[in-house]
Amino acid sequence: MKRRLETELMTDAAQVKAYAEADFVAPNQHFIECLINFIDNPAFCGHALDLGCGPGDISLRFVQHFTQAYVDALDGSVPMLDYAKAACPPALATRCQFLAGYIPTAALPRNHYEVIFSNSLLHHLPNPNSLWQTIKHVSQSGTRVVIMDLMRPESEQHAHDLVETYAKNEPAILQHDFYYSLLAAFNINEITDQLHYLQLPFTCQASTDRHLLITGVMP
Ligand SMILES: C[S@@+](CC[C@H](N)C(=O)[O-])C[C@H]1O[C@@H](n2cnc3c(N)ncnc32)[C@H](O)[C@@H]1O
């Protein structure tokens, strides 16, 4: 099945509300556990960048876990960032900065980050190089990169089956978005080619039946 693009920025009010209020505890916790494992340093106290942070749940989990770390969390959707800022406890606001900006052209507060992560952004991008070039631009030797995204199924029927399995009790708008996000996602071979072309020494593997995980350390 060929990739079918979906809307890039999530700015529609109903879509943002449904996404921000959905229960993503399990997948977000799964992502955070992969991130913690890959950082492999319980005392991490550096600066991290969250690309396509959406309503900010993962950025906040990050600074709650790493209690001396900082995160700059970037998204091109102001309505998404409004949810993120509202969800941020005042005590975390000094370590978690939500920023409006479009990838790959956004200006970032720092030149380099020690950790760069992103969940569920890649499939939104018409050109995946927007993500890979941004990572190259704001990383340094040793930067740890953890990217998770949906993995495009073989067929529309398989996408329908995944929606039925994992989202059948969700609101219709979330089921709709999940289905079209699956169709917009890349598969492992495509991502492996993208990484190879840009000489990024990352590995890409399936982490569930619908997610893939890309990890690596910048040389
Ligand atoms: C599916 S949400 C994921 C949000 C969050 N990472 C999470 O896991 O809950 C994708 C987010 O990426 C943002 N996005 C898509 N393309 C973008 C771009 N080129 N620049 C900045 N943000 C973008 C969307 O606005 C949306 O908030």
Image (tube, rainbow, N blue to C red):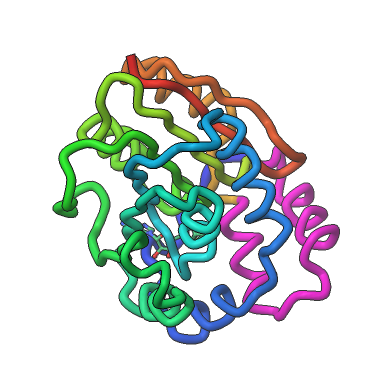
Q: Residue furthest right?
A: 165
Q: Residue shown at 62%/36% (left/top)?
A: 212
Q: Quadrant of residue 26?
A: bottom right
Q: Residue shown at 25%/25% (left/top)?
A: 140
Query: What segment carries the magenta color?
Result: 153-182
Q: Quadrant of residue 181?
A: bottom right
Residue 211 versus residue 187: which sits nearer the camera?
Answer: 211
Say left or right for 14 vs 85: right
Place of residue 161 in the rendered image (x, y in percent of width and height, measured from the top left):
82, 54
16 up-or-down from 112: above or below? below
Place of residue 211 in the rendered image (x, y in percent of width and height, measured from the top left):
66, 42
176 up-or-down from 142: above or below? below
Residue 201 versus residue 209: which sits nearer the camera?
Answer: 201
**Location of the C terminus (image quadrant):** top left
Majority secondary structure in the magenta region: helix
197 up-or-down from 132: above or below? above
Place of residue 193 in the rendered image (x, y in percent of width and height, measured from the top left):
45, 20
State yes or no: residue 170 in magenta.
Answer: yes
**Where is ligand 1, by quadrant?**
bottom left
Place of residue 120 in the rendered image (x, y in percent of width and height, measured from the top left):
52, 52
State yes or no: residue 101 in magenta.
Answer: no
**Location of the N terminus (image quadrant):** top right
Q: How many marks?
A: 0
Q: Residue shown at 44%/65% (left/top)?
A: 54
55 up-or-down from 69: above or below? below
Q: Residue shown at 23%/61% (left/top)?
A: 101
Say left or right for 47 vs 68: left
Say left or right for 135 vs 169: left
